[in-house]
Image: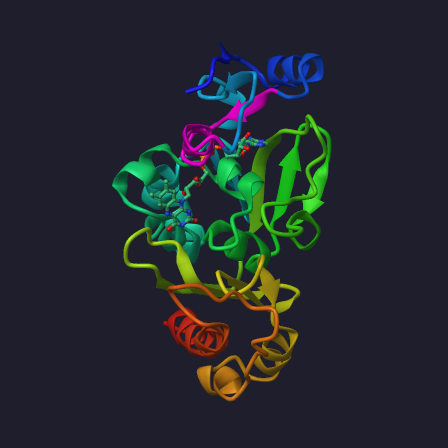
């Protein structure tokens, strides 16, 4: 490991002040990506600001129309939350399917979306449900938050404090997972929202993306057969030892169809 300074912060304001003083410092959530990156010598921050003791980043609030999850909520906590299970069962199921028990006990929603791994599950849920990412500076719509590979709209020094999910009429997430890591080879989140159906895909491309053709078809009829014949192009999709771009494109249709069926119960 490198030599670095470790500081436990106790508020978002403390973390923001420390980042302002030392812009190369890194926020530490569950360390599931950051510590691994440091061990692999891919990151070398001079200071880690541990968010593990910041009460304002914790908690789940449910009101009539939305579920707001604090940035430091672990995947296992979201998966086990009776409130999330009741309001948006698809979101609890998504969290329950992340990684293994250890990853779910340490990994956080804030860390996951800040990292924006192209195969991560939460980006599909955040975009599929048209969520709002709340930071210490502003609110960012899901469609504007995720940029390119491992890139988000967060400005230097900006801290995610929570993610607010509107409760959909119905939703489901289906993923074809890598059997070793459980990351999505392809994952599709389908939600029937107040603004119409949304289809968000993770794992297939360099970042999460929506499929407008499927959304339009589901708007006409919310049924698996509406998406069954809609194909996405394999141009620009990921290709690796796990799956070709062509296979990933095929999986988008298959997972979308299964997600619509699951959303209908
Ligand atoms: C073996 C393994 C299997 C996994 N499988 C899956 C899977 O199936 N699906 C899946 O989706 N993910 C998977 N993950 C990823 C995991 O779920 C974590 O969400 C992810 O690694 C981020 O970890 P973390 O929350 O501990 O954040 P950290 O590693 O602590 O931080 C990640 C990045 O986010 C920044 N950050 C953290 N919190 C904030 C904040 N509040 N505001 C701004 N920036 C912040 C950090 O500075 C850092 O740059 C897996 C990880 C491992 C190690």
Give x and y (percent) for residue 101.
Answer: 26, 41
Tell me the quarter of the picture where residue 240 sits.
bottom left
Question: Of 33 and 172, which appears nearest the observer?
Answer: 33
Whether residue 102 can be seen here: yes
Residue 227 placement (x, y as % from top left): 51, 82
Q: Which residues are magenta?
A: 25-41
From what the image shows, is residue 102 above or below residue 177? Answer: above
* Relative to 207, residue 45 above or below: above
Where residue 143 sits: x, y (%)? Answer: 68, 55
- Compared with 262, 100 (above or below) is above
x and y percentages locating residue 33 in the rendered image: 44, 36
How many numbered markers are drawn?
0
Q: Quadrant of the N terminus?
A: top left
- Residue drawn at x 62%, y 63% is 194
Rendering quarter of residue 52? top left
Quadrant where the image shows the C terminus? bottom left
> Which residue is rendered at x = 40% and y = 34% of the image?
32
Q: Quadrant of residue 88?
A: bottom left
**Residue positioned 57% across, 39% down in the render:** 114
Q: How is the image coloured?
A: rainbow
Q: Examine the structure image and report whether residue 28 is included in the region drawn in magenta.
A: yes
Q: Is residue 153 left or right of residue 72?
A: right
The residue shown at (63%, 79%) is 213
Q: Can residue 65 be seen here?
A: no
Up/down of 142 relative to 168, above or below = above
The question of residue 245 being in magenta is answered with no
């Amino acid at each position: 490991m490198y030599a670095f300074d470790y500081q436990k912060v106790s508020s978002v304001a403390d973390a923001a002040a420390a980042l302002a003083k030392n812009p190369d410092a890194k926020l530490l959530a569950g360390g599931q990506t950051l510590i691994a990156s440091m061990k692999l010598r891919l990151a070398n921050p001079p200071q880690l600001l541990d968010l593990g003791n910041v009460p304002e980043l914790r908690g789940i609030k449910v009101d009539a129309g939305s579920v707001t999850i604090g940035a430091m909520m672990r995947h296992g906590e979201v998966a086990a939350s009776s409130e999330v299970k009741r309001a948006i069962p698809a979101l609890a199921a998504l969290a329950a399917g992340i990684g293994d028990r250890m990853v779910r006990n340490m990994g956080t929603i804030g860390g996951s979306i800040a990292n924006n791994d192209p195969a991560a599950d939460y980006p599909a849920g955040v975009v599929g449900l048209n969520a709002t990412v709340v930071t210490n500076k502003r609110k960012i719509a899901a469609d504007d938050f995720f940029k390119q590979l491992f890139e988000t709209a967060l400005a230097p020094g900006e801290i995610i404090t929570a993610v607010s999910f509107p409760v959909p009429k119905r939703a489901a997430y289906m993923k074809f997972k890598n059997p070793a890591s459980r990351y999505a080879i392809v994952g599709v989140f389908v939600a029937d929202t107040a603004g119409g159906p949304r289809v968000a895909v993770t794992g297939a491309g360099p970042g999460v993306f929506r499929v407008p053709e499927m959304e339009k078809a589901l708007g006409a009829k919310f049924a698996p057969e509406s998406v069954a014949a809609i194909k996405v192009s394999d141009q620009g999709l990921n290709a690796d030892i796990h799956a070709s771009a062509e296979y990933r494109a095929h999986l988008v249709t298959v997972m979308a169809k299964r997600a619509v069926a699951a959303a209908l119960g």
